[in-house]
Amino acid sequence: MSRRAFVVVADAVGVGALPDAAEYGDAGANTLAHVAEAEGGLRLPTLQRLGLGSILPLRGVEPAAPPTAVHGRLAAAGPGKDSTTGHWELMGVVTPHPLPTFPDGFPPEVIVHIERLTGHAPLCNRPYDGLRAIDDFGAEHVTSRAPIVYTSQDSVLQVAAHDDVIPESRLHAICAELRDVLVGDLAVGRVIARPFTGTPGAFTRTDGRRDFAVRPPGRSYLQAVQDAGLPVHAVGKAWDLFAGVGIDVKHPAPTNAAGIASVSMLVDALDEGLVLTNLVETDQVHGHRKDTAGFHRALREIDTALSGWLRRMRPGDLLVVTADHGVDPWADHTDHTREHVPLLAAFAGAGGRRHDGAMADVGASALAWLTGTGDPALPGTSFLVA
């Protein structure tokens, strides 16, 4: 029987602070619980049946009796609280050292490359909220043609530019070259292109975002699946976060609707293999803006999609829902939060067991499901058996 594994990462849907969260300024973080409180309760019937309310107390989502999926909380083994390290950990890559951050802005050895590529010294160059960056510097950017460059608590270098000043294709090329030259102590986790359009007072981001991630520092379960002769598909920014390493087919998805459509197509058409999906809007569109109503709406759309996927699952299918970090709306900042991530795994014989473990357990379980074997060189423990 052909086997398939679908891993769906609902970006930033954290479920409670990790033990070291205070070191990141995130003591008491609990993204999902705080969104639920802000919205007067969540309405997620499919996730409830799977066991979401059995993972943690969650207003509006009762514990299932019994849950239909293996459920629990997973923890990062390495440092960080961003999408890059989060996705790496899910697939068995634990970074040995924190990726570099730049709380005081980027040093001259970075700025010189930006000036060489754009002809201008950048605007901003400090930690900044992305939407505020285009509001506060967009008009000057349009006049001066200087790019807007900013960072956050995460290991990111973001370059924002108006489409009429630096066309999207050129912005992507600039960020790709920055990715290549930022090495060693400057090897930021992601260089992110942030194109926008509009007029002063009404600037809006386009769907042309592109993430250029540093290559993973080690072998992943994606490569282990490939080594077994099975295809690996990536939906959304999952391909970007692994710099394409271990992935055979890329399905771009700048929105949740596009990502859900790609997964639906693969559920119906894929013969075998692994699908790793990132659904970005709970993070990018709603999380950083502390838009709890939008966050809940995005969760409900995912919940509806899950219902359809589960109805169409085959006997040889594994469906995992998880996350990569948090973005708590109650935090006193707008960045990611250092949190556990949920585990909901539906497969024949799941039995509704509780499993708390490492994020790498997702990759270990996907490989075991697809091949019947593990990889002793990679971290993680399969949750397929008690």
Image (spheres, rainbow, N blue to C red):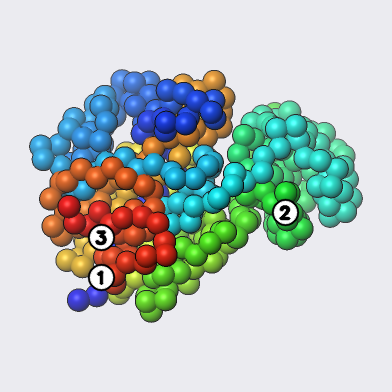
Left or right for 338, reference 216: left
Amino acid at dot 1? Gly
Amino acid at dot 2? Gly
Left or right for 256, reference 344: right
Say which residue label 3 marks. Answer: 318
Amino acid at dot 3? Leu
Q: Could you tell me which residue is drawn at 73 percent across and 28 percent down? A: 136
Q: CA distance from mark 2 to mark 3?
A: 38 Å
Q: Could you tell me which residue is drawn at 25 percent across and 35 percent down? A: 55
Q: Residues within 10 Å of mark 1 (few under 14, many from 20)?
A: few
Circle nearer the N terminus (2, 3): 2
Disc 2 secondary structure class? helix
Residue 359, position in %: x, y? 38, 48
Say which residue label 1 marks. Answer: 372
Q: CA distance from mark 3 to mark 1?
A: 13 Å
Residue 384, position in %: x, y? 22, 57
Left or right for 311, reference 187: left
Using the image, determine if residue 263 lies above or below residue 337: below
